[in-house]
Amino acid sequence: MWQKVAILSVFVIISLVRGNPVDNLLHNDGIEETKFGVPEKFSKVLAIDEPTTYRLPNDSYPISYDIFLVTDIHKGNFDFQGNVMIKTEIKEATNKITLHYRQIEIKLVTVFVAEPLEPIDGTSFDLIPSHEFLVINLPRIFEVGSELLIHIGYSGRLRDDGAGFYWGSYNNSAGETKFYGATQFEVTDARHAFPCYDEPGIRAIMTLTIVYDKSYTALANTEVFIEELEEETNYKITTFAPTPVMQTYLLAFAISDYEYVNATDTRIPQRIFGTPMAIKEGRGNFAATVVGPILHKLEEVLNVLYPLSKMDHIALTKFNFGAMENMGLITYIERGLLLNPALSESATYNQQNSIISLVTHEYAHQWFGDIISPKWWQYTWLNEGFATLFANYIPSLVYPERAAMRSFFSSTIQTAFNSDGPNAWSMNHYTEIPDELWNKFGGIGYQKSGCVLRMMMEVMTAPVFLKGLNYYLNENYMKAATPTELHTGLQTAYDAAFPEKPLMIGDIMYSWEDQAGYPLLTVRVGKNNTIFSQTRYPVHNGEVYAIPITYATKSNPDFSVRTPKLWLPVPTFGFTPEQTGYTDGDWMVVNIDQVGYYRVDYSSVLWRANIAQLNDDCTVINPLNRALLLDEFYLGWTQFRRVGGADAIKILSYMGKEDEFLAWARGQRIFNDLRNHLFDTLAHEKFYELIQEITKPHLNVLGYEGFDGENSNRTSLRSYVKQWNCQAFDNDCFIHENEKFMNFYNNGQEGATNFDFCFAMRTIDETTFGQLLAIVVSDKDFVNRGRYIQYFGCSLNHENLKKLLKITLDEGNNLENDEIQTILTSTYSNSRDGLTLALSFLDDNYMKLKPITNLTAIIENLINYMNTQRSADKIFALANKFEAAQIISKKFNEEIVTKVGEMEKWIDTNIFDILDYFGVEIPTAEPTTPTAAPTTVDPTASTTTEGPTTTQAPTTTASPSTTPASAQSVFISISLIAVCGIVNLMKLL
Ligand SMILES: *[C@@H]1O[C@H](CO)[C@@H](O)[C@H](O)[C@H]1NC(C)=O
Ligand SMILES: *[C@@H]1O[C@H](CO)[C@@H](O)[C@H](O)[C@H]1NC(C)=O
Ligand SMILES: [Zn+2]
């Protein structure tokens, strides 16, 4: 039925454009360069009030479009001519029809009564540029149900910004520039190619005809329906089969001399298009093997067939996004679809993963976005959330060895949390403001929504969730939807599968969709109950989410069950041991694989039990949850003070047995904090010994060097382990890097291998150092010097460092001011000896350095290395001198004192614990003030079930507190550290 209508109007339009009055628009080679924007004569707003909304009125609705475009893009001519015939139905009696347009010149508007075809005299039109509305005024009111045909003749220019109907180019193998025309209509650029009802919830059948040079090929959403050659003009006229009832933003076409490769193993014909050279080089061959299996898997799991009879994938040299899910014609940025032949084996593997993921993302949209579209951009997440989920889920089924679901943990949820801060929008947030629509396509629309959907998939189990999607797709096939329709589909499947466990899917999902942010789940255990509490993190405005709680415990260490054991739809609730299965003293790991969209704040008791288990046998806990523990430990330590410095050491100390690189990645912040703060303290040496102990076993297995074709997880693991090992001053690491460097130094490029310059400099001998330094500072080329200058300060040799500092003031070096600054920074930041030397150097030479370096920046940065009274006293003295010499202001000097105080606070809070753990004896020196002696917490002050094991006063409320329990806190006088510092127990290497 709809085909007939469409075909009929194709002929109407072709006969219209071939006769007068638009004929001259078509074959006019002398077209003027039209300027963009709306021509002056149209831009006046006539007697129409400024619209109050950017949304179209609902008084008419399109049935079909016949679009007729003429382009000479093969000549690099960017002008195009357009005609569109819109068949529309009046839905509310009206004498106006409102359409969208953008950056085109409307030449002619004629309206017909559709049946019998009869022109309506006396129509006119107004343009409202601010809203991009084209308003057609009819001479009389048309009643509901009237069908009209609107013919609009217009001209435009292909855009160069990759949006709307735009042009791109590439250089072919003969070095000639070749032009092509392509489209990108989402969000609101279809209206640039043709006036239309440009909203995602409005659908119509579209029949496209393109007139272009016969040396080119035109592609569109559907297959070619009729193709004719006009002998005398060399134009090809291609009419594509009518589309299904489709949203305007999904229409796509491309006119190019691209070539293609056929996909293999595919139910329908699929082609991969690229520049002739790329196709010849076989760069499309990988994609050609994956598009079929991905299509089949989506059809299988959703049990709804892809609706068209073909799919084309085209890799465009100019494209603003990764890819676009146009029904039947997916457009990609080149590297999103075509393999780069120059990559190493492991980089190729990674690019393959991203091609698989991108293809799957766009393919998933054929159902979520294309078959079902959101009623309005408010629900963009109904498209992007599913595309995010399936871009990982489908590859995990088709290519299980690529472990695609891991990226939810390693990146998707991280991006989601980062996007979902205090000022974030909710998933269902409404906006119609054009500039804001793009924000619906950010971390909330993609990643958060993907995480929430994934959480629901695990809540319902994958088969039931997919069955629910099948209901949703069938019920709303080729229609627009809102989340309510999704909930209904999911509920139907859930009720059928689990009648004995009723769940209100809609209520659960709305709690995540309508409220911005994510919760922090606090877990506290007592003898009689386990209390779960939630607050939105980090700011709370009374949000309550329906949280599915999963966990494993010592008595039930099963990490494979990801359906919720408990629900927390209220702010706080205490569950009995019968409900939780938790036995006093057990460890408990919550949020298996971080499937739940929330973070966890464990009580001190649980942290200690969990850390003990990690050290005892970490393999009992699954790898992703071990990584998650390291991640959440950092929150518990730095934000909620559930744990202290010794716990931080203890949680790192199990890592000699940790093979999961993500755990090393997540442990990075703990390691960095300890390293920075323990620098120059009594605990320094013991800490480095520990890091060496946990890294050495891994290096013994993995070796120092990777090899091509190595598993990328193994490469990542080595990279973390080696970094930590070297940063812990392991001599073996330095020797290894130094050997590689010396090989390079002696043999030039031939000996070059990848070495870490800083680590190579650690053990460099004085002769080589002197030679290299002399060469570098006398080199006249800034770029050459820049390769080395920041690494000299890494040396651990006292004489080398002295020489390095001295040379900055020598006459005749070629160093520029910021290079001198770099040398100073690299000296004090890389070793204790360097810090001491740099401080004295600054003290002796600040007047000479004043004109050539930024001493303010230096002293500000130095604060980060002030962990002892000894160095703090030096910086205070220096700051006073700087103030006297008017290098810094009095106010800045005071700020320095405050900031050093913050460093001091960290030491205060953590160091006793740490020294005690390491068994480092604190020298019994006279503290400057007697009250400053360390005291321990009185554990009986605790009123919670936490018990006496905590050394921090736990909070007594259910919600996490970010205030340190200052009344009870361990106070250690900085002067005591000073005494320790003076004793100088530590010798670096
Ligand atoms: C692709 O497959 C079609 C149908 O089998 C065939 O006609 C065409 O020649 C093939 N094209 C290429 C480039 O392999
Ligand atoms: C815990 O349960 C025991 C036994 O049921 C009871 O005697 C005790 O009073 C309870 N403790 C608390 C703090 O409720
Ligand atoms: Zn998408």
Image (spheres, rainbow, N blue to C red):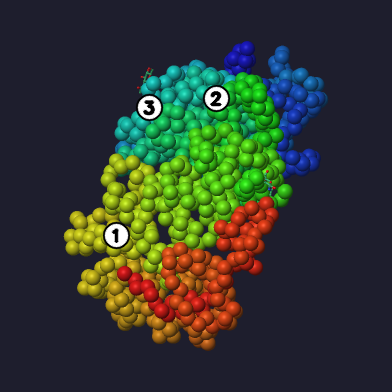
Name the residue located 48 percent from the left edge and 70 percent from the top edge.
864
Q: Quadrant of ligand 1?
A: top left
Percent x, y of residue 50: 77, 43
| Location of residue 318 in the rendering, given as x and y in whole percent from the top left corner | 46, 40
User: Residue 348 got which mark?
Assistant: none
Q: Identify the disc placed on residue 733.
A: 1
Asked if residue 300 can be seen in this view, the reply is: yes
Going by the numbered disc 3, the residue's amino acid type is Thr
What residue type is disc 2 on? Pro
Image: 438 above or below 679: above
Which of 46/665 is in front? 665
Task: Give whichever of discs 3 and 1 has the lower sequence position.
Answer: 3
Residue at 58%, 46% (x, y): give it.
584
Earlier residue among tags 3 and 2? 3
Front residue of this view, candidates 487 and 906: 906
Instruction: Residue under label 2, please give it.
Output: 463
- State the SS at label 2: helix
Q: Residue at x 40, y 84 (%)?
A: 845
Residue at x-position 65% and y-position 68%: 967
Q: Which residue is mark 3?
A: 289
The answer to whether marks 1 and 2 mark residues whose Cβ atoms lie closer than 8 Å is no
With respect to residue 97, does 167 lie above or below?
Answer: below
Q: Mark 3 against mark 2, which lies toward the viewer?
A: 2
**One can see residue 254 in this view:** no
Q: Label 1: few (<14), some or many (≥20) within 10 Å?
A: many
Marks 3/1: CA distance? 43 Å
Q: CA distance from mark 1 to mark 2?
A: 50 Å
Label 1 residue near ligand 3, CB within 8 Å? no
Nearest the viewer among 866 and 150 is 866
Could you classify mark 3 by the number of other residues whose Cα lies within 10 Å: few (under 14), some (14-19), or many (20 or more)? some
